Image (cartoon, rainbow, N blue to C red):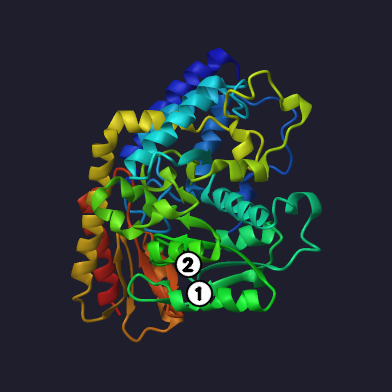
Amino acid sequence: MNWNEFTKFSQMAATWGADYHTTLRELPVRAQVAPDEIIAKLPGSAPETAETIDVIWQDFQDIVMPGITHWQHPRFFAYFNANNSPASVAAEFLVSIIAPNCMLWQASPAATEIETRMMQWLAKAVGLPDTYKGVIQDSASSATLAAVLTMREKSLDWKGNAKGLSHQKTLRIYCSNQVHSSIDRAIWIAGIGQENLVKIPTQGNLKAMCLNTLRNAIITDRSQGYLPIGIIGATGATGMGACDDLNAVADIAEQESLFTHLDAAWAGAAMICPEYRFLWEGADRFDSIVLNPHKWLGAQFDCSTHFLKEPDNLRRTLAIYPEYLKTNVDAKVTDYSEWSIPLGRRFRALKLWFLMRCYGLEGLRSRIRNHVNWSQSVYERLSTHTKIEITSHPILTLWTFKIKGATDEDTRKLVDDINNDGRIYLTPTTVDDALVIRFQGGTFDCTEEDFQTAYETLVEFVDKI
């Protein structure tokens, strides 16, 4: 493909993309293929000679698309949505064309300075003080790993990177038993070890960490020679939306001199609506906060925003200075590669710039408020069904249920049957050690009718039981 062919193909792809999004409701949400069905259609070796774009495009239609689960489908009620508004897609297209590596200010001044301003815009939009500074990471997993590494280094007086952990005290980090698996993975990669991630039981409708248990665990660990280094809180945890009492957690952290990180990857986006901020009251006392605009705000994946009270702690943990990265403006500028685990960085800030300007904060708020209202309407109607047991109440758009008396096997079969039908897509989770069905909605362009379809589909399947 040359640049003349690129022009023709790009126009065709843009037209196809618009048609794809406007006709998604006609497709089953989840890919309806069997394991190995796609790979069986792919040759075992790469072609020796060039193939035309027309042939490749046809194979894309025939091979790729049947094997795609449609995350942008308006009736995608599984996981958390990875949204892509038209504005952010347009920005990503431009980024792909210019293809900058934004590791240093000098390597891409516009990318660095737009990122700085976008993080200021977003911090203000979700109600964080302007003392917080931010960086765009690829995912919440990376932001959490960066926070865990910072906890580790700060607690070891910045000696862990240099000397390793073998002669140090055993480190301990605390979180609830509702946290995302990325927390566990960060503990592994940081060399702290799964056994030293202390998971605190939860209580109440919000499944918040039990504070007395948390406090006692820290005191007991100190007395036994462990070194407590940090607490990871949650606002809107993935399973059923658990939210910790952040002010109370921050009180304990301050009393014990522990670093704090808040995982608000999904629910943090809703904080652009002031009426939902009660869910993370006290967030402004945390050292590190992550929220993902690529989940609910409509930014093209990937775009995870990481806010820091004292970014120098993160830089001291991650920055490294080989000669080939030094420039004559280092003292005057921000180099975001010092704030991230990878050296190379994409120009992710452009899609936030396009997104917030094309829709405005009020336009984004309206979408989130609609999703919350529509999801809670489905909950209210289903909660009166005689065969349904509500297992957790709505936290924003997320809630869970099961069939009364159902075994875990029964629940898994019901989820599979619903997903094989194709009209909607759901996933299971566990609540109080029982397998339940998880419902949440937030596709960028979904409508109230899509939630109505979800309600009707669920009632149809439940009534068959």
* Image x and y of residue 218, in percent: 57, 73
Is residue 89 left or right of 278 when viewed as pictured?
Answer: right
Residue 443's place in the image compared with 409, above or below, is above
Say which residue appears at 52% left-offset and 50% top-offset.
140
The image position of residue 23, as x and y in percent, is 32, 41
Residue name at image x 31 percent, y 29 percent: 358
Residue 422: x %, y % from top left: 37, 58
Residue type at the position of mark 2: Ile
Towards the viewer: 79 or 255: 255
> Disc 1 to disc 2, how far (Cα)?
7 Å
* 193 versus 301 height, above or below: below
Determine crowd level at label 1: few under 14, some 14-19, many 20+ residues with C-alpha closer than 10 A. some
Q: Answer with left or right where residue 269 lies relative to residue 448.
A: right
Q: Which corner quadrant holds the C terminus? A: bottom left
**In the image, what residue occupies the spot 42% across and 84% down?**
407
Cβ atoms under marks 1 and 2 closer than 8 Å: yes
Q: Which residue is mark 2?
A: 252
Element type at mark 2? helix
Q: Which mark is residue 315?
A: none
Looking at the image, which residue sits at the far bottom? 405
Q: Which mark is residue 215?
A: 1
User: Identity of the amino acid at label 1?
Assistant: Arg
Indicate whether 294 appears above or below 104: below
Badge 1 or badge 2: first in the primary sequence: 1
